[in-house]
Amino acid sequence: MNDPFGDARLSNTGDGPGEIRLWPVVLLILAIFGLFVGRLFQLQILEGEALLGRSRINSVRQVQLEAQRGAIVDREGRTIAASRPAYGVGVVPNDVRNPWRTYSVLGAILERDPRELASAVGQPRDRTRFQPVSLSKDLGLEARAKVAAHRYALPGVELQQKPLREYVFGPLAAQMLGTIGEIAAGELEQPRFEGYRSGEIVGKTGIEASEEGHLRGRAGGVNMVVDVAGREIEELDRVEPTPGGRLVLALDLDLQQAAEDAFVVEDPAQPDLERRMGALVALDPRNGDVLAMVSSPAFDPNAFAGGVDHETWRSLNQDEWRPLRNRAIAGVYPPGSTYKAIVAAAGLAEGVIDSTTIVPCYGSFRLGRRTYRCWKRGGHGPVDLERAIAGSCDVYFYELGNKLGVEKLAHYARLFGLGHATGVALRGEVDGLVPTPEWKLRVRGERWVDGETISLSIGQGANLTTPIQLAVAYATIANGGRVIVPRIVLRRETWDGRVVEEIAPEFRAENVISPAILQLVTNGLRRVVMEADGTGRRARVPGIEVAGKSGTTQVVSLDLVENLEPEEIPLRYRDHALFAAFAPVESPEIVVVAVGEHAGGGGGAIAAPMVQKVLARYFEKKEQQVPTQVATIAMAEPVDRTRARATTRVVGASGGTATRGFDAGALP
């Protein structure tokens, strides 16, 4: 048979051409093998010790450098919130060699249960095991020294220098400033947190949340050579972080402190009550500047700066009086007799009354089979508009409200800014409620009855307003008919003070009602405060013309409490006290609204003095007219919280320093 391969078959006789062609292949294989063996000998025998040492430092770790959060200052540049350097301790789970020893030593230093520490590190959520888990964010000097001393004996443990938020005056304006915290897994999926990393600190509430984009800095980073135990050996390169922007608020620290002090109770009959609950808002009616905002009870936002502990969070969150809620924008109250100013304006605008219209008040008003009584049982006698406002005559406003009707009442309430959010740049603001027949049918499935219109006419019934809405309404009266949007922020700056953006005043509506009509209403409001027997006389400021209106709103039916002494009425059943005012009457510069929640007394007796404290401080400060320079607060130094929860130091030009409804009897 013929061989299909012919001469191409290799010969094994030793003298064919195929044998000659195999030798180069064999020699090449032998050469490669020889080089491999030689290199192996070099690495293991000749250079083994050197390479073993180098293998211990051949890891490069990327370490993020957190940026300082931007400072928050008041309108005069005084620091309210800033960031200071702080040292914490963290653990890189992958680098821990002896967990029992590591957490026992750290537990002793941090005075925490080792099992708690192990649990925290063992559940790093969505972090990788190569990222440090923070166990403490603000170590004292002694604890820091102990961690440093044990550092090299405890692989995986590292000291972390990070900026820590500090609120200089503790609870002062706490709800407005807000809180910060670690970003949640669910938040990372939201568009507004695009580009954020797990573990980053973000604003959760208040200004910290609404101005997150400006206050947040830009993180830096460093590439660090570490050994097999995670110990830092050498820094390769570094990008410094950029601090967040500076925020200048409309807030005036002096007025804020006066407003906070207004909630302090100095009543021997109530020794257990240190502070009233409620809210206070001070606005500039010309531009909407929020000069002061208080919500009481408050809390210390410093508790959240380093990560709030479980016990503190539970205590705040389960407190029945809800200290975390900003009552100024989210607390809703019947406006009581403060609402009568709006009803009066509506009556004038609709031509139902004029300034000379007389309504006789004999102590009651009858509609159908029902009688509605005036707070003054004997009646006010014949009253015109000014006297009706000054004396808070319920019968006058029963008559007026009945003639206007519920739809007109609702229309004018909305014109003045009630029933919808004001637009203040804070999250969590609520709309309040301006009730209508359509609302009642939709929500309660019931038809409107005429008696409800009568209750609305004096600010009772289903009427609900927030303190900031009431402040906007009275600002509209004060400024001649412009509905302002409250302005929290004056300007945004870079961290070193260069202006990024000036925030212009904003008005929701112009000329919502005639200035001439508002002047007639103002005349009545002035008499409330300035007349000798005015129910708002406790809001007077010497030398200043003040206009205002008190209000007292029921919380429960009188049947439940009429046989009890005031001190016997449970706190939650006590009346709310309100007062709204502006000054000076001729050219208003400031509006103040105070709500004493469950204060158990009248607006004139309780809320008017609260308003007076703020007005007095405003005009006292204005009268001084002393050039001031702001003392610099070194954030790394201990914070002085020795005086009434807040202290501010102002240096004068001479160098001196300063550390600074129904209305019952005379209750409206």
Image (spheres, rainbow, N blue to C red):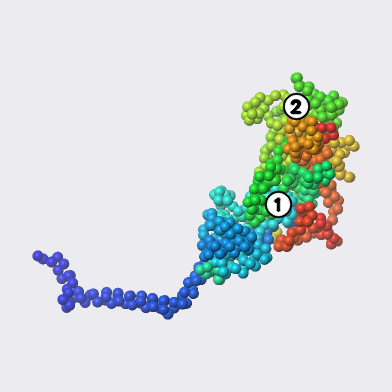
Q: Residue furthest right?
A: 532
Q: Which is nearer the eye, 283 or 280? A: 280
Image quadrant holding the N terminus, namely: bottom left
> Mark 2 touching mark 1, by CB under 8 A?
no
Q: In x, y percent, where is residue 419?
A: 69, 36
Q: Amino acid at mark 2?
A: Ile
The numbered mark at residue 454 is 2
Residue located at (16% from left, 67% from top): 5
Q: Residue type at mark 1?
A: Asp
Write down the quadrant of residue 387 in the picture. Answer: top right
> From what the image shows, is residue 260 above or below residue 60?
above
Secondary structure at badge 1 equals: loop
Tell me which label, 2 or 1, sits earlier in the chain: 1
Residue 667 appears left or right of 311: right
Q: Residues within 10 Å of mark 1 (few under 14, many from 20)?
A: some
**Residue 606 image offset from top left, x and y in percent:** 81, 40
Residue 631 left/right relative to 238 = right
Relative horizontal placement of residue 148, taking residue 372 as reference (left or right): left
Residue positioned 64% across, 29% down in the render: 444
Pointer 1 residue: 300
Circle 2 sits in a helix, a strand or a loop, which is it?
A: helix
- How far, Cα to Cα, is label 2 from label 1? 43 Å
* Residue 106 image point, x, y percent: 60, 63
Number of marks drawn: 2
Residue 244's x, y, as percent?
65, 57
* Residue 134 figure quarter: bottom right
Q: 148 or 660: which is nearer to us?
A: 148
Q: Nearer the viewer, mark 2 or mark 1?
A: 1
